[in-house]
Image (cartoon, helix red, strand yellow):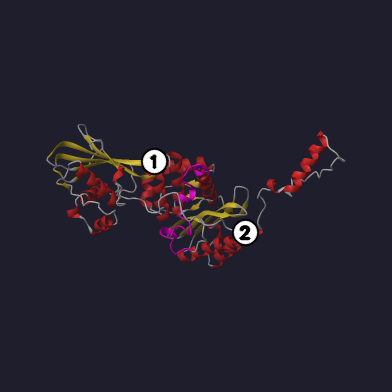
Amino acid sequence: MIKIFAWTMGGFFLSVFGGSGEPVSLPLVSWQSAPIFALPTAPDPAVATIAQNYLQRLQSRGLDLSRQGVSIETDWADLALHNPRIPASAASLTKIATTLAAVETWPIDHRFTTRFLSRGKINKGVLQGDLIIEAGGDPLLVWEEVIAIANKLNSLGIREVKGNLLVTGDLIVNFQEDVVKSGELVRVGMNSDRWSLEAKKAFQDMPKGTKEPGVKISGTVKLMEKVPEGTAVLLTHQSLTLGELLHIMNVYSNNVMAEMLAQSLGGAGKVAEIAVKSAGVSQSEISLINGSGLGVENRISPHAVCKMLGVLQEKLAAGPIKLHDLFPVAGRDKEGTMRWRAIPDGVMIKTGTLAQVSALAGLIPTRERGNVCFAITNFGSSNIEGLRHEQDEVLQALAAHWRLVPAVTKGSLPKKPFLGDPGRNLSDRS
């Protein structure tokens, strides 16, 4: 048809501007029927049937269909809908809203900083005063990072702190949300003589040649509102990039990381506000009490889920980090929430689970329809494994119906982040 279209247009120009032969009779609708003008807006009865069969199976299990949500859609067409705009308990689909708010707020290569300062003189390896931590929202400050920080302090000539460990800001170490306990973990991690089995295991996973640090802190952990006067900056620790952090958060559905990012953004209300505005949905479709999804009060409609994923995909399209770099993809990611799932290769997902809630959303890369978004929310059954199986069956049926684009086997982010990278501990003292 494209060749016929081209020939017809050529005949048109010959007849108007001169040429031999009789004028060509032009089919009036030839250009309209050309494939280049055929947008994939048509409904798909097969997809609607797959969704209907799925809902019937849920009903046979005793689930109230008024509490279930389904949205299978593209940019051009709604293929299967059931309660698409009714906000439902979203569980960890909430992390999609947190991801969108983070990407809208910070560059994808943004790093959170944690400053280490001193109050007192340093003499012969001993800080005669306090060591101060000014926490800046790093959601992945783990053993490896603390060990690398301590090694940097050793290189700056500090092996002992006679004063206290003072902490300001929301310090979270090893996902411990109690700031004082996180401070205690810093004290342990900085002194290899006090390492726990977990700290020793983390050290073994660090690159060969990494030294065992020795920074002994004599005092106790104390909280303070702000950094006192008369301090000197020893070093600034940089986190992994935002892209790396979001990838880890979503692959493992880490609640502490999500909540810490939400707090850095201004809280659950601010996350919801940003997500609603960015996705262009009604305020009633996104209502959050936190950034992680813990609690049935977090409610998002299937329609809003797909809109958020669409905005994220468009926003990241021109950069080196794509949407599929921030979420688990079947065939590429084996750990985290992808384990024990029967997801077709190439499909990007985000899961959500609470006591009576199971949710699944993501993108199916198809040749016929491009990226197809799906969002499924279930409520009312304690048989979570059964609900997951049914969700996976839907995706398997859709994959059998369409031709999927080959799976993404390699992302733009490192498969395993370099935790404890000494290059992220910066100081103008050395």
Name the image quarter holding the C terminus: top left
Q: Position of residue 356 (x, y in %)?
A: 45, 60
Q: Residue at x 41, y 59 (%)?
A: 335
Q: Position of residue 58 (x, y in %)?
A: 54, 64
Which stretch appears magenta? 314-341
The residue nearer to you, when weighing 407 against 114, is 407
The residue nearer to you, when weighing 263 against 116, is 116
Is label 2 or label 1 in front? 1
Amino acid on which disc 1 is placed: His
Asked if residue 302 lies left or right of residue 195, the reply is right
Q: Residue at x 47, y 44 (%)?
A: 320
Q: Position of residue 181 (x, y in %)?
A: 24, 50
Amino acid on which disc 2 is placed: Val
Q: Residue at x 48, y 61 (%)?
A: 380
Q: Which residue is mark 2?
A: 47
Asked if residue 355 lies left or right of residue 397, the reply is left
The residue nearer to you, when weighing 364 against 291, is 364
Q: Position of residue 172 (x, y in %)?
A: 30, 48
Asked if residue 87 lies left or right of residue 114, the reply is right
